[in-house]
């Protein structure tokens, strides 16, 4: 983690570092989702979303290429970065679609999931303000509530052992 902290110190005066500690209050693992969505919701409501927000959790250095992160931070520091979204992790998952994933997608976006979802391991990303503000404050509040309530992770009412 020392290398990451050293790189982040190079941004002194150009941004702020927020640390969110999330105490798990349910049986579901939601720490990074809760922290990221809490941060977004608070800043959207206060109308002070940063130009770029970097989301990284505590084991980020295991999932990132330090040289790539260094290049991204340098580009940010020089004002040469123009992206809406940039994934920072190096491991990618194959395309998937599960009943749980389809339910979460529909609860989040209000429409059925078409096709497969491909994503990266662990949520380490850089997001431009415009991408965050493209959604309403209510969207972020509803998504945070969805993570907290986790209806998609509950066992089915029929008593079977698998989640929807």
Image (cartoon, grey):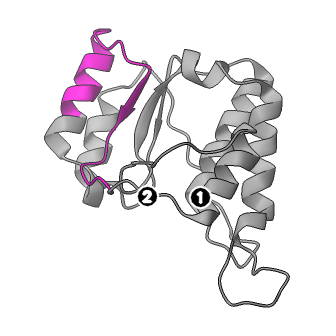
Residue at figure coordinates x 33%, y 34% from the top left: 9
Query: Picture quarter containing residue 59?
Result: bottom left
User: In the rendered image, which residue does mark 1 sit on?
Assistant: 101
Q: Is residue 137 left or right of residue 50?
A: right
Q: Secondary structure at mark 1?
A: helix
Mark yes or no: residue 155 visible: yes
Query: Picture quarter containing residue 24?
Result: bottom right
Query: Which sits in the foreground, 122 or 78?
Result: 122
Q: How many marks?
A: 2
- 40 drawn magenta: no
Q: Is residue 138 above or below residue 56?
A: above
Query: Which sits in the foreground, 98 or 57?
Result: 98
Q: Quadrant of the C terminus?
A: bottom right
Q: Is residue 150 left or right of residue 87?
A: right
Circle 1 residues within 10 Å: few <14, some 14–19, many ≥20: some
User: In the rendered image, which residue does mark 2 sit on?
Assistant: 96
**Are the residues tagged 1 and 2 within 8 Å (C-beta)?**
yes
Q: Secondary structure at mark 2?
A: loop
Residue 71: % across, % down: 19, 28
Residue 162: % across, % down: 65, 83
- 73 drawn magenta: yes
Residue 90: % across, % down: 24, 49
Residue at figure coordinates x 28%, y 46% from the top left: 4
Q: Is residue 95 above or below residue 73?
A: below
The residues colored magenta run: 70-93
Q: Earlier in the sequence, mark 1 or mark 2?
A: 2
């Amino acid at each position: 983690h020392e290398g990451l902290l050293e790189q982040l110190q190079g941004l002194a005066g150009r941004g702020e570092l927020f640390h969110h500690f999330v105490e798990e209050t349910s049986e579901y693992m939601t720490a990074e989702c809760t922290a990221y969505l809490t941060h977004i919701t608070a800043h959207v409501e206060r109308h002070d979303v940063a130009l770029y927000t970097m989301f990284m959790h505590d084991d980020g250095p295991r999932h990132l290429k330090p040289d790539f992160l260094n290049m991204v931070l340098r580009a940010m520091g020089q004002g040469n970065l123009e992206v809406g979204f940039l994934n920072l992790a190096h491991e990618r998952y194959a395309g998937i679609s599960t009943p749980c994933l389809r339910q979460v997608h529909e609860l989040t976006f209000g429409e059925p999931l078409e096709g497969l979802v491909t994503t990266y391991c662990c949520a380490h990303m850089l997001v431009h303000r415009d991408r965050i503000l493209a959604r309403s404050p209510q969207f972020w509040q509803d998504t945070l509530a969805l993570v907290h309530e986790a209806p998609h992770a509950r066992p089915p009412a029929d008593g079977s052992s698998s989640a929807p």
